[in-house]
Amino acid sequence: MVPDLELVIQLHDLDTRIDELRGEIASLPRHIAQIERTLDAHIRKVEADRAALAANQRERRQLELEVQTLEQKISKLKDQRSQARTNEQYAAFEREIEFGAEAIRKHEDRILDLMSEAETLEKNLKAAEAALTREKQQVEAEKEQAHQRTADDQESLEEFQGQRRQTVAALSGEVYAAYQRIRKRRKGVAVAAAVEGLCSACNLALRLQFFQDLKRGDQVMFCHSCGCILYFQPPPAVGDLGAEAAPETQPLEGSPPA
């Protein structure tokens, strides 16, 4: 194979890996930001659950205080009722006592509802806090892994970029310029294998004579359809495929060895 063709294939492999690394390096901060946003949302949800439980407890304490106040008032009204001089006064005290008793019943019903709600809130809050603790640990672990992966990717990227510079320096300027134009036009795909008479980039058939010339590998050739730099890739040998597919046979018991 002509040296320029070997070099441009190597360059294409390097650029593909460099693009992958750059994409991964760029995606890792986005991944960290996403898991942190998710964590923040869960933290706010737990805080809202805590606030709901605190509001429940405040309302219950307030109602209990009001019940105490009403009970003290009713006790005084009963004392005053016993001193009533007329039926009208007695009836007025009775109405106030009944009004207070009805308010107490409503407050007590609400307190029971709040206690039931508090039980559910406390249960849910306990589960949410435990889940949040686990999530925080997981997020920190993922962030540490992402930072380490970024450092590893950056090291690999610098290594590949160094190899790229060496490859470009050895490649002829004409072929490199053509490679760059094709790569820009085709969004990174500039080199393709020709397999069984087809360009693997556009899947279109190559002319027979062109394909025969390509097999020799003594020049840099371009696909007439998509413009990619082509190289010949022979199909896998039939014997190799048969060896992989055929299971090893064992002689029957009692039969003589081959």
Image: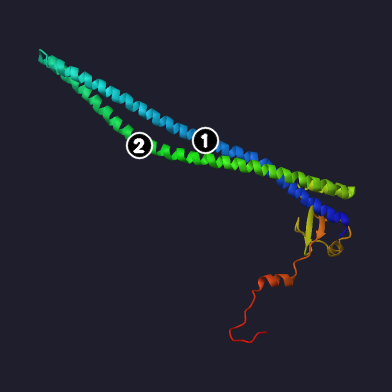
Q: Give residue 13's position: percent from left, percent from top.
A: 77, 52
Query: Is residue 227 shown to the viewer in this render?
Result: no
**Residue shown at 25% from the left, 24% from the top:** 103
Answer left or right for 246 relative to 230. Answer: left
Q: Secondary structure at mark 1?
A: helix
State whether residue 104 is above or below residue 202.
Answer: above
| Amino acid bearing label 1 | Ala
Give whichever of 218, 64 is nearer the camera: 64
State whether residue 190 is above or below residue 45.
Answer: below
Q: Quadrant of residue 37?
A: top right
Q: Give residue 208's position: percent from left, percent from top.
A: 84, 65
Q: Say which mark, if any, is on residue 41.
A: 1
Q: Say which mark, if any, is on residue 230.
A: none
Characterize the local packing of mark 2: few (<14), some (14-19) or many (20 or more) Cα atoms within 10 angstroms.
few
Label located before the other in sequence (2 or 1): 1
Give the distance between the C-alpha atoms of the residues marked 2 and 1, in whole angstroms: 24 Å
Q: Secondary structure at mark 2?
A: helix
State whether residue 223 is above or below residue 84.
Answer: below
Q: Give residue 157's position: percent from left, percent from top.
A: 74, 45
Q: Quadrant of the C terminus?
A: bottom right
Q: Quadrant of residue 53?
A: top left
State whether residue 184 is above or below residue 114.
Answer: below
Answer left or right for 183 relative to 125. Answer: right
Q: Which residue is mark 2?
A: 119
| Amino acid bearing label 2 | Glu
Of tags 2 and 1, the one toward the viewer is 2
